[in-house]
Image (cartoon, coloured by chain):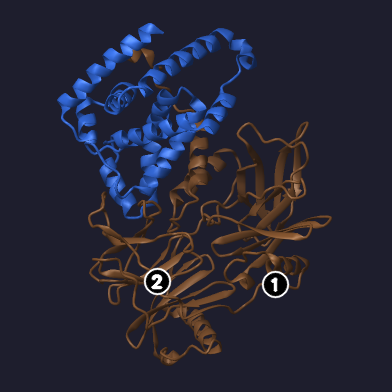
Amino acid sequence: MTIPGGIVDAELLGRAAAGDERAFGELFERHMQAVWNHAYRLTGSWAVAEDLTSDAFLIAWRKRAELKLVRESALPWLYTVVSNLARTEHRGAGRRLRLLRRIPEPGAVSDHADVVAGQLDSEARLREVLDVVRGLPKMQRQVVELCLLGEVPIADVAALLEVAEVTVRSHLSRARATLRALLEEK
Amino acid sequence: MSSDFPARRELPPEVRDRIRVRFRAGLDRPERRGRATWFAAAAAVVLLAGGAVFGIGALRGSTPVSPAAGDAPLDRCWTAAEKAGKTEGLGSRAQWVTTATESSGDDVVVAFTVDGKPAFCETTATTVTLSDPAAQAARPGGQAAGVLLFTATGMVAGVADPSWEQVELSMPDGLGMVVAKPDKQTGQFIGFTGADPAKTALWLGRAKQGQSTRLWPRGPVPRIADPLVSVVDRPGDRSSAEGRALGECLAKVPDPPALADGYQPGAMLTDGPNSLVLARMPGHLIACVREGTSYRLVQDTFLGLTIPVRRLSVPPIGGKVPFVGLTPPSAKTMSAEFFLDGTQTTAVPVVRGTFAYWVPPNAVPQDNGEVSVQTSDARGVGLFSGGIPLR
């Protein structure tokens, strides 16, 4: 990934792997917002998204020597890390309890009741979708998380998952059909 | 389908700050070498933006020291070897040739040669650990590098083919990576891994600057030879009230730490027949707890140098919850905000880089489960301002 006037991820990562912490810091600042948004889309909770974002970068820092770049961008790899973390998060009962505690109570923000109601509806809908996504076969789930939730181009997903683009398209097509059918049932 | 997904949002500055802080707090795994200094800079910017000026003095990594500065530690190592009657095979002190010196806080490691054979000596405020020049380096299969010393502080020292640009030290799962640079002449390298040798299987491999993926395979380091000398040559204080309590407690716990005499006492809590005393060594913080007639030890995972103020989780003692942990060594004061009916700011005693206070009954954490604390040095200069977990 190239930032206008900036340095590509590959170079920053190379410097980080060689021990340049500031280079990693630049990567962190560059991708934090995207990772945070992706984490929200995977969990339906902004609070949990914060935790997952910091956790994802911790993993990236520790695995910086083997972080996989796709077209010189670290973002797709970071998305897969967040996806893994989100699944762990979802499985952890303790974490679920924490998530529940963090969901804002509508009464606490009653001045903005309409907005909040809409937001909660939207979050509820997102969680509904996520429940269905989690039930997909592994490959379909991965392409949904990357292509639909992460909006990563199909070619990049193919490179990241080390499969042909046509394979990604095929899984995505099947996943869309499954999601459509299951969500219409709800 | 994508209409089911919420639009992306701009990351609010306060959320960005929280993520930064959580990331920094999560850096409590090994990997000390200059770790996340960029983060300290970012945190400093945040604090400055808030109108307060703080230094993050505790964020120190491995620091090269001029070879001449290594003479004093080597003299101490020689004296320790003499006292232990282990100078056979060490030649004379005059034959020791310093090749490099690295430090992390008051943990100083000197690489030297004895009659051309590589050796290392680590000194802390209270201990000396000297490798055996006659020992074979513990070398993973197929690797042209091996380890001669892996000490309780997490310091790893060894020898690699001088043509290796870097040596990568890591955990079996590849995490906790530290990269050390071998000396171009002798191949000696030193790394502060922060890992606990009693619990850590160390892996080693070749690396080079600028690599973005592993270029060479790693291998598990086999059993490392025992050090020639490992002693407490400058025992910790046992004459003050805290020191006496620590000495008594460490003598009675069933599982005293290695080099127990080297621990310096810190802050203490008492409550009738119950007490807790903290103690530090480079890389370690312990709490020695007396509950009635029983004694037990609570040990931290290794200290993260990037976390200047950190809580050590100790179970309740006689029903009271201890709020204890470490501060930068230069800290003299700490204030903590506990939530009771309202916010109550409390002065928390700080002794030798540790703090201890009984959590007030009915105190509850902030929404994020933390207590806000501030620490300052003797001149009143802020060292840390942030949250640490209450739960």
Any idea which chain is the brown one in this picture?
A: B
Q: Nearer the viewer, residue B375 or B155?
A: B155
Give the amino acid type for the residue marked by disc 1 in the picture: Asp
Residue occupying the point 40% across, 43% down: A59
For the N terminus of chain B, give its image quadrant. top left
Can you tell which mark lies on residue B108? none
> In the figure, the blue chain has which letter?
A
**Residue B10 coordinates in the image, percent (x, y):** 43, 25
The C terminus of chain B, quarter of image: top right
Look at the numbered disc 2 and give the secondary structure of its residue: loop
Q: Residue at x 41, y 67 (%)?
A: B156
Residue corresponding to mark 2:
B224
| Rendered view: B169 above or below A137 | below
Name which of mark 2 and mark 1 comes first in the sequence. 2
Residue A108 placement (x, y as % from top left):
64, 17
Q: Nearer the viewer, mark 2 or mark 1?
A: 2
Would you place residue B347 above or below residue B237 in this image? above
Residue at 74 percent of width and 37 percent of height: B363
Chain of the residue on which disc 1 is drawn: B
Which residue ends up furthest to the right in the rendered image? B272
Q: Secondary structure at mark 1?
A: loop
Q: What label sits on residue B237 in the rendered view? A: 1
- For the question of whether residue B214 can be seen, the reply is yes
Q: CA distance from mark 2 to mark 1?
A: 32 Å
